[in-house]
Amino acid sequence: MTKGYLSIVLHAHLPYVRHPESEKYLEENWFYEALTETYIPMVEVFNRLSGDNIPFRLTFSISPTLLSMFIDPLLQERYIKHLKKLIELSQREESRTYGTPFHDAALMYKERFGRAYDIFVHENNGNMVNAFKRLQDRGHLEITTCAATHGFLPIMMTNREAVRAQIETAVNLHIKHLRRAPEGIWLPECGYCPGVDEHLKEYGIKYFFTDSHGLLYAYHRPRFGNFAPIYCPTGVAAFARDIESSKQVWSADEGYPGDADYREFYRDIGYDLDFDYIKDYIHPDGIRTHTGLKYHRITGKVDLADKQAYYPDWAMKKAEIHAGNFLFNREKQVDHLSSLMERQPIIVAPYDAELFGHWWFEGPNWLEFLIRKAANHPTIKLITPSDYLRQYKVNQVTIPCSSTWGNAGYNQVWLNEKNHWIYRHLHMAADRMTELANMFPQSDGNLSRALNQAARELLLAQSSDWAFIISTGTMVSYAIRRTKQHLSNFLRLYNEIKYCRIDDGFVSHLEWQNNIFPDIDYRSWRSRNQGQHIAVC
């Protein structure tokens, strides 16, 4: 008898990092590393489960920026080159590590990179959206969307047309490539404020996620706490993160990823080995970088230099133990909750997908063990939010409170003394984009191209990733440069469009450089139910 449900939610997102002007951009490695360590291993796990007829239902959010990188031919071509270099390096490492404690791990990497090549090139022709769509069509994954460029919506609410455009662009891209409308959305940074749900409803979004306090401090307080969804007055449902299940996986100190037998992320041969040996596999300018080949385990709270050898078999055994422990804890949680509720509770466990495989190397294996164990569990079943809403159509109506899942639970990560300066420029640019959309309700030719490119530049500037990077102090110069460059591009296009002096060469260059959302429609920014000043250019 099913007593309750577990909803695993994985949010796959990266900022749009594509630099056709050079192959030397370190930041493109973010995408290549995530493909090798997270997205391809996840597909491999899901395909293995499907092939073994293991029933499972998971929610997988693919952000529009990541989807756009998945389908980009330039990035596909560059990733294949990257993967071939990894395969070559792993073959050399097989010989170099022979007779050392690192040899088993070297063989593991050689096998993994070879499988990654087969999955990426032979099974999916370089486009991983195909893999996720097949899993969706088989009924295993419920794929949801996110705002177009992960724009932080609560601060963008000063211009509602900008919020609409983020959502509309995302939904249109999702439908085009996954062939169905998204039922749910991962709000960027789980950032919610009252009113956001009004725009979700406009575009057919049925549910979103908040952090725990988003529901716990709702007005009125939810009867079932975080263990059942609520409906906003608009009819859009909100699901809240479960604190206990999140801590067990997220926390490097108290959670599973910090176990001594798991792989140490920060110890990599790109930094350890002699430069002459490793130089062909790091940045061409000689900058030491992560290669993905790491031979040490976490060991404990010791210096990196004192880490001990990593043994894949030990780590797999520990991942299975931890999967069993996680499910046991959810069983006890459900037993308690079901005794207090007249409905079956739902435990929502949302995570960044990149935690699994990239940061926590054994994460995909842990997830596979968990799904296999859950398939035979007598009282807990995996479920997606839309499945739960179909089962329980009547839910309490209340208003979630403003919240994020960032530090301190509100907006301070994305609005603080380090990054506050960006918002006056983003707000001004959004207002000017609405002005252009109102001025030109119809357009064609070069004018239409310029207007659509202005929309792309604005969306790219609005990415919450830039404010986050500036706040955390990693790759700050890159985040500032991207913010300023997209705003500068937008302002130049705005002036050229408004004063009828469009530089076709400049527009063509930006279309080549920043080619995200080829089907974008600048009219997404038009004012609703307001008078418009129409111009002719």
Image (spheres, helix red, strand yellow):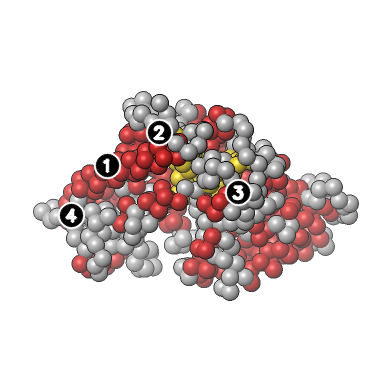
Q: Nearer the viewer, residue 196 or 475?
A: 196
Quarter containing the N terminus: top left
Q: Amino acid at mark 4?
A: Phe
Q: Is residue 508 left or right of residue 435?
A: left
In three-dimensional space, the C-alpha distance between marks 3 and 4, rounded to whole angstroms, equals 54 Å
Instruction: Note whether 138 is above or below 22 in the view shown.
Output: above
| SS class, disc 3 | loop
Q: Residues within 10 Å of mark 4 (few under 14, many from 20)?
A: many
Q: Nearer the viewer, mark 2 or mark 3?
A: 3
| Residue 175 rendering spot, x and y as whole percentages | 61, 36
Hey, what amino acid is under mark 1? Glu
- Secondary structure under the numbered disc 4 in the rendered image: loop
> SS at mark 1?
helix
Residue 89: x %, y % from top left: 27, 53
View extreme (left): residue? 99
Query: Which of disc 3 and disc 2 is earlier in sequence?
Result: 3
Circles 1 and 3: CB atoms closer than 8 Å: no
Q: Are marks 2 and 3 in contact (CB under 8 Å)?
A: no
The residue carrying mark 1 is 320
Q: Is residue 238 visible?
A: yes
Q: Which residue is mark 2?
A: 380
Q: Badge 4 is on which residue?
A: 102
